[in-house]
Image (cartoon, rainbow, N blue to C red):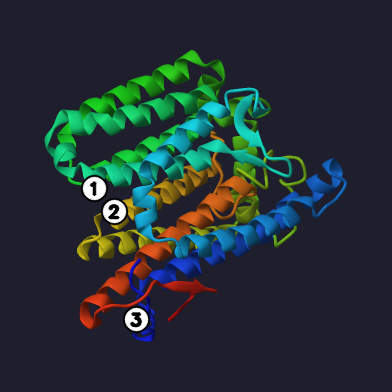
Amino acid sequence: MNADMTINSARRITAHNPLLWLIFSACSLLVIGIIMISSASMDMAAEVMGNGYYFVVRQLIFASLGCLLALTAANTPLSWWERSSWLLLGVGLFVLILVLTPFGRSVNGSTRWISMGLFNVQVSEVAKLCLIAYLASYVVRRRDELVNTWAGFLKPIVVLSLASVLLVIEPDFGATVVLMTAALGMIFLSGVRLTRFLPLIAVCVSVGALLIVTQPYRLKRVVSYLDPWKDQFDSGYQLTQSLIAFGRGDWTGVGLGNSVQKLFYLPEAHTDFIFAITAEEFGLIGSIAVLLLFAVLVLAGFSIARRAEKSGMPFAACFSYGITLLIGLQATINIAVNTGLLPTKGLTLPLMSYGGSSLLISCISIGILARVELERLSKVVDEKKGGARPAKVRGGAVYE
């Protein structure tokens, strides 16, 4: 950004500004996540790792690093992301290919991680952000072609299809669904007619159905999802244990640390099913509170994107829409899986589940959204007062 945020522009960040709601909801979810990971993982960590605080200490380290990366992203000009779109596309596709080589690490039959020594990087998290940045740049550069011609519409679809194929090979069907849905949402919001999506939607549904039918474990998940109690000790085990957690939670929950399902009954209690443990310990009231925080975060993201669009910042608006769709869709799918509304998928709950890759990318995404709003405010001030210097964000505050 070529203009520095002034004190007057800082005063414009009022209680009605979506930036404050974004930071409030993200920080709240991050803190709740750390508390719930501590509760959900302590017994399992003590048994498996020999240290009850193993997972929560690592999550605290990831959270600290994530906050630093969020501040870095908030101080990185959006022009860098736009200029680097081809580089980011290359990085996204490269890591998706690299994980399929001997550098990839397999866990539970899926090769989704690359070992970095102290921790593993889940490549789909990195690739999703990189591809969304590229697509935002493409939409801005080729908007007329995208909106008016089939060729312009199909070019990004080909790139996304290549990334989807690589994700399916891992396999990571959940990340594929999130990426494709968020990307199509961005293209639709750019002004492409809905009729152009109908053939693509038909193809995606057909391919998805084919992938489910041809893979026995996926078909088994769908069948068990329809009636998990029919085979509650095999294919329906995770879902039934998750539903038991919700039932035990009742209205107000059994209390922090008093979950029974986390005691080796519910697999992945501190990762994919953290929401179920939250529901068990804090009940319906706690579950609704988490849902409301995610709703506030998503609405704040869309509000930031809309404001950027009205201020004549097309790349910032498109990038913000894409990031918000990624976070919102992943949270929706994870919560739907926990409650039995969707078949079981290995997707983390953003900002809450244990996992360094997901948390770091989520924090970077929040930092980018914050940057969008800061640049918009700076542009408003610049239009009124003339030249200024780049914004500096320290500890969530804006300084001259």
Residue at 52% x, 42% y is: 125
Decide if residue 387 is in sight here.
yes
Q: Residue 296 falls in which quadrant of the image?
A: bottom left
Instruction: Rate crowding at label 1 as few (under 14), some (14 to 19) or many (20 or more) other CA atoms within 10 Å.
Output: some
Q: Amino acid at mark 1?
A: Val
| Circle 2 residue | 315
Decide if residue 282 is in sight here.
no
Q: Are marks 3 and 2 in contact (CB under 8 Å)?
A: no
Q: Residue 171 falls in which quadrant of the image?
A: top right
Q: CA distance from mark 3 to mark 1?
A: 27 Å
| Circle 3 residue | 9
Residue at 50% x, 56% y is: 364
Residue at 42% x, 41% y is: 87
Disc on res. 140: 1
Q: Earlier in the sequence, mark 3 or mark 1?
A: 3
Examine the rendered structure and indicate whether residue 383 appears above or below residue 263.
Answer: below
Instruction: Rate crowding at label 2 as few (under 14), some (14 to 19) or many (20 or more) other CA atoms within 10 Å.
Output: many
